[in-house]
Image (spheres, coloured by chain):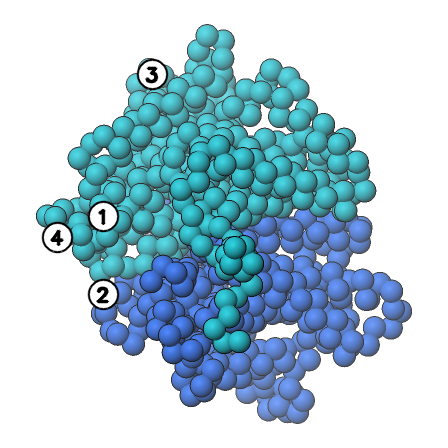
Chain colours: A cyan, B blue
Amino acid sequence: MANKEPLIRIRKKDDRPLYQKILIKIVFVVLALLIAALFINSVTKLNPLDVYASMFRGAFSTKRRIWITIRDTCLLLSIAVGLTPAFRMKFWNTGAEGQILIGGLVSAAMMIYFGGKMPNAVLLVVMLVLSMVAGALWGFLPAFFKAKFNTNETLFTLMMNYVGIQVIEFFVDVWDKKQSHSVGVINSETRAGWFPSVFGQQYLINVLIVVIVTAAVFIYLNYSKHGYEVTVTGESESTARYSGINVPKVIIRTMLLSGALCGLAGFTEVAGISHTISTQTSGGRGFTAIIVAWLAKLNPFIMVIYSFLIVFLNKGAVQIASDFNLNEYASDTITGILLFCILASEFFTSYQIVFRHKEEQ
Amino acid sequence: MTGQSLLAWISAAITFGTVIMFGCIGETLNEKAGGLNLGTPGVMMLGGIASLAGAFFYENVVTAPNPLICVIISLLCCLLACSLAGLLYGFFTITLRANQNVTGLTLTMIGTGIANFFGGSLVKLSGGVGQINVAATSRAFKVGIPVLSTKLGIVSKLLFDYGWLTYVVLAMAFRMQYFFNKTRTGLNLRAVGENPATADAAGINVTKYKYAACTIGSAIAGIGGLYYVMDYVKGTWSNDSGIEALGWLAVALVIFTSWKPANATWGAYLFGFCYWVYLYIPGSISNVLMKLFKVQRSTYMQNLYKMIPYLVTIVVLILVSSRKKRENQAPASLGISYFREDR
């Protein structure tokens, strides 16, 4: 008995053809939609088809909604892309929330103090640069100590989020004239520091920024010496050291970049979307983006798909919430279901389940 | 500072510490078996809402709720929900070998989502914000130790005037320390966390240990959520994800204690002191700082004081890592999935 093979065993199988991998993913995404429908149905007794029709309306029913869906997809994508260099190095930057917030804070500060005092284009450039510097600083601290003492970066960056949140709370109080603990829309009349509409499209600049950042990161990581060093350091630090790569330098440089890109996302959010600053500026996207980036195996093209799916579900859930009088937290639950299903699909694309009798034939 | 406010500070620190001590002990158990469960904040949210829902429906059905049944129902709901969440984490990270950080973060997202979703519904059911109240259950959890909690004057107030879970968690911390160091099962568990391949070769069922650790660990962490709802906020609910923020501190506390649950008995209270220090900063210091930052109101400065627990955690992280003592390091296989055929 002792030597008998177990009934089910798991074998590594990472040579599946591409169409199989895609098929598996699609099956699991559909499964996620089914489970989500089941969840909605069980708590609301609504017809799932009505619910999905409602979700679809939430994301696509008007031209404005389509643009908002695109805008939010881009925002999530830009954070996921920003995290990519760090993750390629296997540096667990869980601090995107804080980096976004601090980037957004600096942008908002420039809008408040320099709005109207310099040409809008100059102001926007200054905001862009300073928000990236702020994000980079937020990323630098954990990276420095990781490089020096191998300090656990997951928790360090996580704690930096909360430090960031308190800094925001502080400035919200300082800038708030009405004692309402909210800054309100900044420069709502002058529109100083707001992204201008281009070709009549309010959000075209947001999209452009993301396209440029994504392309730049893709090229940087795959076709530059720096990118190669990042990859080697991520695969094995000892290999990197042996081949003469200055590991601490690579860690710090890569995190500066990752933090700067997340700070840039904060700038996009403040200057291009909300025109205000609060602890909700990041809105949990920093965490969602971590999952997006990892599930997409750091491939920017797959990140687009996952970001879109999540934003679609999000918009949909908000629409259901208002259509059927539910609370807005349904969307976190539904997003969670989707992410768990995609996580599960990972297993089936890279492993194979082998049954005993099959093996004997 | 007056004696009165010092007493209030200590008492706030102890109730705060109890919440995160539960989370910390649960997470330590998980991490000792090699699983870095970033889902703990979500699990604690689930524990909170499950216990609240159980108590809510029991108190609504019965006219005169029995305290003992209140405790049993809410505790059972909490343990059930959290072990299921732990099992889910285990299924993904152990059987499906998914990345632990991603699984954990997703679990936190879904746990917070579910808790706030049902929390919102319960609030609506009970007629609006601040209306939900499970007074009977909350009272049952706030029962202190008889005699000691009333008869000793200031000592009673200082040390014994807390709900009984405050003392349960202390016992649990020491028991867990004993379990890791002195029992065969505990040593096996640590072997699994240090080097699963070696443990496997020595005939230890790695999968079984890992599953047990994340299920039981999540259940223990979940009680922290229950304590938060029943004792810390006195049987109410608000959708502010307060438990989640404490959950992250619980995860940080694991590192602060360098994976030794006995250290959590003082570390958790220290975090509690840091967390509440913003209310007790002396006026003279506050005035100087207000001038320095050019702020008019002292409440503005409180936002900055609230950073202190996180800054302390960061400093501790740096100190622990810079000293590089072997006995203070994380379990060697922490965060890595084990696949037998990978050897």
Q: Position of residue B248 (x, y in %)?
A: 47, 59
Query: x, y (%) of residue A73?
Result: 50, 29
Q: What is the x, y in percent for residue A86?
A: 31, 43
- The label nearer to you, 1 versus 2, is 1
Tags 1 and 2 on a common chain? no
| Label 1 – label 3 distance at C-alpha | 39 Å
Check the residue under mark 1 and report the chain it is in: A
Chain under disc 3: A
Q: CA distance from mark 1 to mark 4?
A: 11 Å
> Do residues under tags 1 and 2 come within 8 Å of each other at their CB atoms?
no
Q: Earlier in the sequence, mark 1 or mark 3?
A: 3
Per the model, the C-alpha gap separating discs 3 and 2 is 46 Å
Q: Amino acid at mark 4?
A: Tyr
State whether residue B152 appears in this view.
yes
In the rendered image, which residue does mark 4 sit on? A242
Rendered view: A257 above or below B286: above
The quadrant of the image that shows the N terminus of chain B is bottom left
Toward the viewer: A127 or A32? A32
User: What residue appears at the point 62 percent right and 62 percent down from the top-left corner?
Assistant: B84
Q: Of helix, strand and loop, which one carries label 2?
A: helix
The 10 Å Cα crowd at callout 2, few under 14, some 14 to 19, many 20 or more, is some
Q: Nearer the viewer, mark 1 or mark 3?
A: 1
Answer few, some or many: residues within 10 Å of disc 3's Cα (few below 14, many 20 plus, some between 14 and 19).
some
